[in-house]
Amino acid sequence: TPMGKGMVALPQLSGRGSCGATQPSKSPVKSLARDTKYELQFGPKDQRALETAFDSYLEYRRKREPLLEDERWRCVLKLQQLVTSRNISLAGREGALYEELHRSCPKRLCERARFLVVMRRVFGFELAPVRGAVDQGTKKLMDNLFDAFDEDGSDKMPWRNILIMLHVVCFPTREPADHLRWGFALVGSEGSFDMKCKPPFDARIADAKYLLHAVGHAEMRPMLSKLVDDAWTGLVRRGDVEASTLTRDAETQALMLQASGKKALDREGCEAASPMDAIKLTRPLFERLISAPPLKRLMEGSTPFGL
């Protein structure tokens, strides 16, 4: 959907690229079941069948991801109409979407049943025949919304992504950096939305990547993550004292954890993708990160993004 005059956005997010999935090797059994007892169970026919199945799966993912992405934005636009008509706040007050969702599900991923209960409480619709009525239209929207964000079919989805996308469609004339600042406060707040990001506050480099993933095309996520990594590395190389100290501490801690057979953890206690992803960000440091090349290019205006 083209954005009107005054819209601003991330240039790299304005068009779809090619799918980032890799092609299977000519000998899939060797790559998928290397050095295991299961490799011996596959004959030539099984190898061909496995390769065909893998090709079919990659094709399915290639076609499914853009459809899911389009459905996410359609559902968010419908939700935005509901939010506006009922004067519901996104965050920052009692009864707002963020506060209600965080109270029931403080972690990054939320299960369907819990999500629907929170939405019923916020929007006041019935999930089951109570007093003889069910708001079928609103319930269907919430089910479709959940399905669109449940990308891997695990019956869990990142509920904060919905709010970040809602912020984009509710305030379409704001600059990309403003949406990212709001999203940064969202992911780091501990139940009560705080735009000033005062303690207790916990947001990591991984969260900065999630913010870009929320509004970017799915196939571009690896590239967006690399932009964050490159921007952080640039801060360190240019002598940013805070970034350099945090990086040195993270590398030291990673070596100590490696010696004991452990890895760096994210803010939910799960293994981080890298020691750098687990680094905590303050609001001033986040500002310097999104202002650093190459992320700085994403903050330039006058081009549409997201839709």
Image: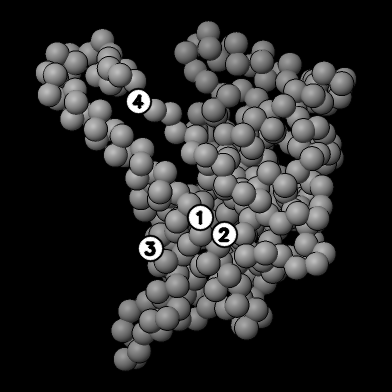
Q: Nearer the viewer, mark 2 or mark 1?
A: 1
The numbered mark at residue 69 is 1
Q: First in sequence: mark 4 or mark 2? A: 4
Mark 3 lies on residue: 113
Q: First in sequence: mark 3 or mark 2? A: 3
Mark 4 lies on residue: 24
Count residues near mark 4 (Cα–Cα under 10 Å), then give few for <14, some for 14-19, many for 20+. some
Quadrant in which the C terminus is drawn = bottom right
Q: First in sequence: mark 1 or mark 4? A: 4
Name the one closer to the observer, 140 or 255. 140
Amino acid of disc 4:
Pro
Mark 2 lies on residue: 162
Q: Provide the secondary structure element on which disc 2 rests.
A: helix
User: Are circles 3 and 1 on residues that touch, CB within 8 Å?
Assistant: no
Amino acid of disc 1:
Glu
The numbered mark at residue 231 is none
Amino acid of disc 3:
Ala
Residue 113's spot in the image, x, y percent?
38, 63
Residue 56, relative to residue 165: is it above or below? above
**Cα distance, mark 2 to mark 1?**
12 Å
Q: First in sequence: mark 2 or mark 1? A: 1
Count residues near mark 2 (Cα–Cα under 10 Å), then give few for <14, some for 14-19, many for 20+. many
Residue 40, relative to residue 114: is it above or below? above
Residue 209's spot in the image, x, y percent?
63, 39
Residue drawn at point x = 55 percent, y = 72 percent: 79
Residue 114, relative to residue 134: is it above or below? above
Task: Answer with left or right where residue 166 lies relative to residue 144.
Answer: right
Count of labels shown? 4
Q: First in sequence: mark 3 or mark 1? A: 1
